[in-house]
Image (tube, rainbow, N blue to C red):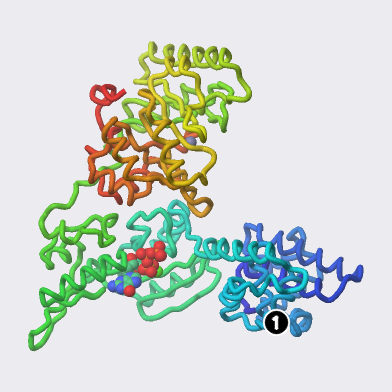
Amino acid sequence: MHKNMTNLEIAELLRSVAAAYELKGKGPFNRFKIGAYQKAADSIEHSTMELKDLWEEGKLDQVPGIGSAIAKYLGELFKTGKVRHFHSVMQDLPSAMFTFMQVPGIGAKIAYKLCQELKIHEEKDALKRLEELAKLGKIREIEGLGTESEAGILRNLQELKERGAARMLLPVASSIADDILVWLKKTPAVLRADPLGSLRRHVATVGDVDISVASDKPREVIEHFKNYPKKVRLIEAGPHTSSILVTGGAQVDLMVQPPVSYGALLAHFTGSKHHNIALREFALRRGLSLSEYGIKKLRTHNPELKTYRTEDEFYRELGLDWIEPELREDTGEIEASYHHKLPKLVKLEDIKGDFHLHSSFSIHTSHDEGLHNFAEMVKKAESLGYEYLGFSEHNPSQSGTTKNEVLTLLKRKKEAIEKLKSAKIHHIFNGLEVDITPNGKLALPNEAVDLLDYMIVSVHSSFRLSKSEQTKRVLAGLSHPKAKIFGHPTGRRLNKREGIELDWEKIFAFCEEHKKLLEINSWYDRLDLPDNLVREAVKRGIKMIINTDSHQLDHMELMRYGVFVARRGWAEKDDIVNTLPYIEFKEIF
Ligand code: DGT
Ligand code: CA
Ligand code: CA
Ligand code: ZN
């Protein structure tokens, strides 16, 4: 417990108190208290306002779910960093118990039992010990638990580990950074400010937000940073660095350097770590030592520090071409830079069309429908400067429609699109996103396919087939001549679901031979094909298409995230077919 706890931490604390009451027995009074603490925890977890701010404004009792007793305890917490009553309720209980309760499926009673029977009391390494003992079969020996509980606990421990490592999705981290940049620029001491680290490299998920500032007054900048209105806690502050925790729980690291050495700072904190290490070794072999301040020549009597205003000058000093941040992962970029062979990465401005759009045109789709109609989406595409687009609603539901109904629906859609075309609004393609069913068949009758210009074929079910079955399934689905695009190929959902297992050697070979396109889906929790597979595809000369998978107009602006993925995979304009002008693009379909 301490004075500056975040909402999430407070919610967890209240759940611990509830658990303590739960162990104390079943009296009606206890049961009432347990409910009250749990309800307060739920409400705090979902509150958009920081609880401490509300307390300072005297509005704590206005939060639904927080009664006067709990409000009083929270006041004590914010004032003194402790709640005597909570201490007295929880003091006889092993602290490891509350750690165990983070594991899904472990409630207060089981947690307590595990502590007693396995003799784990301290929080430190509690989960690790629990895992070890579960693997040794010690949990099944506890009365009331069995092999099934043991297996469940092991599974849930694994899940917790993965979730514990949950990272922010790129757009979330970007918007946190943008807000802080606006704040930083409010003081004249800040001459320039940039997001660095994984954020600047446009990694799909971001651990913490790194920000650099050019300034001759670092102290003023740090003070201003510490006053950021959404700060919930100061982690540390030094003469030119500081870290804070902001609303929502993200950590933000700040680094300040004078403008003369800003180039070195950018290079040092853009990373990745592996790129930095490789670059340092590369420099050392040339008798140079790198730091966030600049470059020193070693083996001279009086090694003098040379500073760099820009990253370009910094890299040039090392005999290297400037390297795009997306490439800085130590996967050959330093070598390529040295030989002037870096790729000319594809850019957002190169994109001339979007081919994965879900409109509201009703064809009784098997999955979700879009929100906007053809004309609205066409207009949006025009505002984005596109030359062409393709509508690809989900196929009609197989269980809910007969074959004749499907044909009627798709004829109607074709006519509607023909009408748009004759109005010469745009170059419009009539597509469909079709499920590849678990047995490899497409969820659309063949006659219906004849009505389409193209199909995106995708996996939307049975994600856990074995690698060989899954590969067979996908290749069967892709083998139809009109199945031009393999949609969101791995099916991953970042922080939610692992991708399907595929034999990529076979998939690539098939795409190469039959000129199939791999989609780079820009939806921010897909970003699928992932960047490492993009890189493989680029190496083999397999073409890709970057789509947004939009279900409404503003989704169409997510294209940039797909472009980031392509860039991280070293893709150039030529690797991405929707950079082609219409005349050449239409030849593919
Ligand atoms: P993240 O935050 O996990 O998404 O990934 P990054 O790449 O932002 O990593 P972070 O925040 O730990 O570090 C920020 C920058 O600092 C990173 O871009 C490279 C640099 N850096 C981190 N660790 C090291 C290190 O051990 N050595 C060197 N030379 N640089 C490092
Ligand atoms: Ca970072
Ligand atoms: Ca960091
Ligand atoms: Zn899909």
Residue 443 seen anywhere in this rendered image of the structure: yes
Residue occupying the far bottom of the picture: 301
Indicate which quadrant contains ligand 1. Answer: bottom left
In the rendered view, tell whether residue 511 sits above or below residue 560.
above
The answer to whether residue 360 is left or right of residue 75 is left
Assign a secondary structure to mark 1: loop
The amino acid beneath tag 1 is Pro
How busy is the neighbourhood of tag 1: few (under 14 within 10 Å), some, or many (20 plus)? some
* Label 1 beta carbon within 8 A of ligand 1: no
For image coordinates 50% across by 22% down, the residue present is 444
In the rendered view, tell whether residue 77 sits above or below residue 155.
below
The answer to whether residue 105 is left or right of residue 30 is left
On the image, the x and y values in percent for residue 569 come to: 29, 49
Residue occupying the far left of the picture: 300
Residue 80 seen anywhere in this rendered image of the structure: no
Q: Name the one closer to the observer, 418 or 159.
A: 159
In the rendered view, tell whether residue 572 sits above or below residue 441.
below
> Which residue is disc 1 drawn over?
94
- For the C terminus, the image quarter is top left
On the image, the x and y values in percent for residue 30 come to: 87, 71
On the image, the x and y values in percent for residue 22 come to: 81, 71
Total residue callouts = 1
Q: Name the one closer to the observer, 341 or 292.
A: 341
On the image, the x and y values in percent for residue 164 come to: 54, 65
In the rendered view, tell whether residue 336 sits above or below residue 481.
below
For image coordinates 13% across by 62% down, the residue present is 320
Q: Name the one closer to the observer, 463 or 1.
A: 463
Q: Name the one closer to the observer, 101 or 505.
A: 505
For image coordinates 40% across by 60% down, the residue present is 181
Q: Based on the displayed image, in which of its 4 quarters is residue 70 positioned?
A: bottom right
For image coordinates 44% across by 47% down, the residue present is 501
